[in-house]
Image (spheres, rainbow, N blue to C red):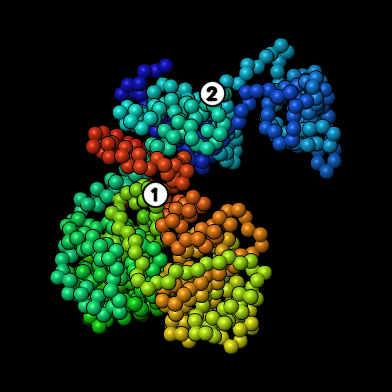
Amino acid sequence: MVARDSTTPQAGSIPVTVLKGVGKKMAERLDRLGVSTVRDLLFYLPVRYQNRARLVALGALRPGMMVSVQGEVLHTEVKFGRRRMLLSTISDGTGQLVLRFFHFGAAQKSALARGVQVRCFGEVRAGANFLEMIHPEYHLLQPGEVLAEEQHLTPLYRVGEGVHQLTLRSLMAQALGYLRDGVLNDLLPGTIRRRFGLPPLTEALASVHRPPADTPLDLLDGFRHPAQRRLVFEELLAHHLSLRKLRTALRQHPAPLLKSDGRLAGQFLEQLPFPITAAQRRVWKEIRQDLQSPSPMQRLVQGDVGSGKTIVAVLAALQAVEAGFQAAVMAPTELLAGQHVTNFRRWLAPMGVEVAWLSGQLKAAEKKAMQHALSSGQAHLVVGTHALFQEQVIFSQLGLVIVDEQHRFGVHQRLALREKGRSQGGYPHQLIMTATPIPRTLAMTAYADLDVSVIDELPPGRAPVSTVALPDSRRDEVIERVGAACRAGRQAYWVCTLIEESEVLAAQAAGESAALLSEKLPDLAIGLVHGRMKPQERAPVMDAFKRGEIDLLVATTVIEVGVDVPNASLMIIENPERLGLAQLHQLRGRVGRGSRESSCVLMYHGALSEAAHQRLAVLRESGDGFLIAQKDLQLRGPGDVLGTRQTGLLQFRIADLQRDQDLLPDIAKAASLLLEQYPRQVMPLVERWIGERSQYGGV
C-alpha cells in the first residue's frame, strides 16, 4: 500500500485511460456514462446486486430463479430452425439443465465438449424438455480445479454501448486498488462522521462495490446499507452547501433600498372588495422588510391554490414602483401572463402605474414599443414569459423580479433574469412564488438559497370543493349533470389530458370533446382553449368565459394556473390517472373560487392501478395542498414536485430526495458544522459532487 502524501495524485485528476483495457474508444464509451476519471468510476455505484456465492443443485431449480450452478457437459450441438443456436446440456447427478446460446462461434462449441465441468450463473427458464438458461455467464473449470466460494455479492452496474458488466467489474477492481493507495481524500471530518454515524469514505466505497457475501440483499437494494447512506449523505450535503454558498454570495452584492411610505399599497388595498387575510399580512410584512434591506431579497412564497399570492406580489411591486424602481413579473405560460396583465392593469391603472406586456407572440412593432417603454422608464411594471430573457430587453432601473409558478422555471432562468437588473446599484430583489406546496424537509435542501414564507390561510367565504371519481362509462350521466348545472346559471370546465406530452394531440382531444359536447348540449354556449392556440385567439374565449357568455369551457391543462372565474363551480377532468396529484390539485383549484358550492369530477378510463386508486383517494379526502404535496412526493418523487428536471441543479448521482428525505434534517445540521468549523472542506466537497454546475450562480 502506498502511503498518501502531498505528491499522491488525487483520483479526480487520474484519467481512466491509466486502467488496463481502456483505450481511446473505451474512454469515449465510458465518458458517455459520465466516467472520465478514476474518481468518477469509484462513484459509479451498482444499481443492484446478485448473490452468486451459493451453488444450487440442478434438481432444485425452478423457473425464475437467478442462481449459480455447476455441472458436467453431457453433449453440445448446433440446432437449426428459424435461427441457428448452440445447445449444451449439463448434469450434476441431481438433474439436467440446457444452456442456450444464439450468438456463438466454433471455438465456444469446441470448448463446451463432453466431460468438461462448467460453472454458470443466469436466470432459469422453462424449456421444451428441460429447464434452461439463455446466454448465462459461465466459467470452464480445468481438470481438478475447484473454484473458491464467492466471497462477495456480485454488483450490477448501469451499462452502455460497448461497456458491459464484466468490463465494469474489471475496471472497478483496478480502481479499488487506487482507492487503497489513498488517492481519494475523505472530505468529511471525523467529528462529523462520528456525530452522524457515517463510515469512512474508503470503507464505504469498498463496501458498495464489493459487499461481503452475507450482506442482506434487501438492505442494499433498498439503499439502506450504512455504506450507501454515507455516500448519499455526502452528495446531499454537497448540494445543500452549494445553495448555502449561493445564498451567501448573493448577499454580498448590494441591492437597491426600496423604501416607501406605503401610499400606493394603501390605495390598492382600499380598492379591493375584501380585506386580505392575516397570513397575507404576515408574509407582506416579511417581504416589506426584505425590500428595505441593502442585500438582495431571495424569498420563496408558498401558498395553496387560491390563497392570494398575487395580491402579495402586487404589494411588493408597488413598493418598488413607489421607491422609483421597476418591477418585472415572469410567468411560465402565455395564459397566466395574460391573466396577470389583465388584473394588474385593472388594479393599477387608476393609480397611474403603467403595466407593460412582453410576450413572444407580440408583433414586432408592439414588441419594440414595449421594449422602449421599459428602457425609458415609462413602464413601471412589466409582465412577461420567457421573452423577458431576450437580449433586447433592457430595463431603466429594475428593482424587483417576481417569478410566478417558479417550479416551471429552472434556477438558471430565474438567476438569468436577475442579471437583467444588475447595475451600479447592485442586484434586484427576487420574490419567487409557487402554488405547489413543498414539504418542509424537502424545501430545506431544494431551496436552501431562499428564505421561505407560507400563506397558510384561504380567504374567508371559500366553499370546499367536493370531489368524486367516476368511470368514463358514465360519461352520458356526467354530461347531463354539466348541462343541468349550466342551465341553472353555473359555469363549468371540461379538461382533457393525454398520456403523450403533446400540445398537438392534446388540442385534437380537446377539439373532439368540444364537438361531442356541442352535439349533446346544443343549448349551451361552449368554448375551447388549448396550448396550440395563439394568445390573441385564446384571449377572446377566456374573456367571454369570465363575462359569463360561455357556459362550458373545454380546455387542456393550459388552464392549470392563473385562471380565476368565481362563477365556475363545476370541473370535469378526463383521465385524471395520467396526472400527478399536485397538477390535479392545481386544476381543481380553478373552481371553488366563489361562495357557491363547487364540485370536481375525476372521470377515469378503464381499470385503475393501485397507485392511481391511491392518488384519486387522496384528492377525494383532502383539499390541503401541503398534505397533497407530501403524498405526491411519496407517490411520484421530487423531480416532478419541484420541477427540477429542468434546473440541472438537483440531478443527483445516487441520492433520491424521496427515498432519503429522512436524512435532510441532519444534512442541514452537518452543513452548518462544516461551514463553521471546517470551511476549507466545503468547496472541495461541492466540486466532487457537482463540479461546474456549482458555478451557475456565480459561486
Q: Please, what secondary structure does the residue beneath circle 2 have?
A: loop
Query: In which quadrant will I find the N terminus?
Result: top left
Q: Is residue 697 above or below residue 164?
A: below
Residue 362 - label? none
Distance from label 2 to label 1 (Cα)? 34 Å
- Identified by mark 1, the residue type is Leu
Label 1 neighbour load within 10 Å: few <14, some 14-19, many 20+: many
Residue at the disc numbered 1 = 442
Residue drawn where x is 40% and y is 72% of the image: 462
Q: Nearer the viewer, residue 146 or 528?
A: 528
Q: Which mark is residue 212?
A: 2
In the rendered structure, which amino acid carries the disc numbered 2?
Pro
Residue 376 appears in view: no
Whether residue 116 can be seen here: yes
**Residue 478 x/y as whole percent:** 61, 74
- 97 vs 235, left or right, is right
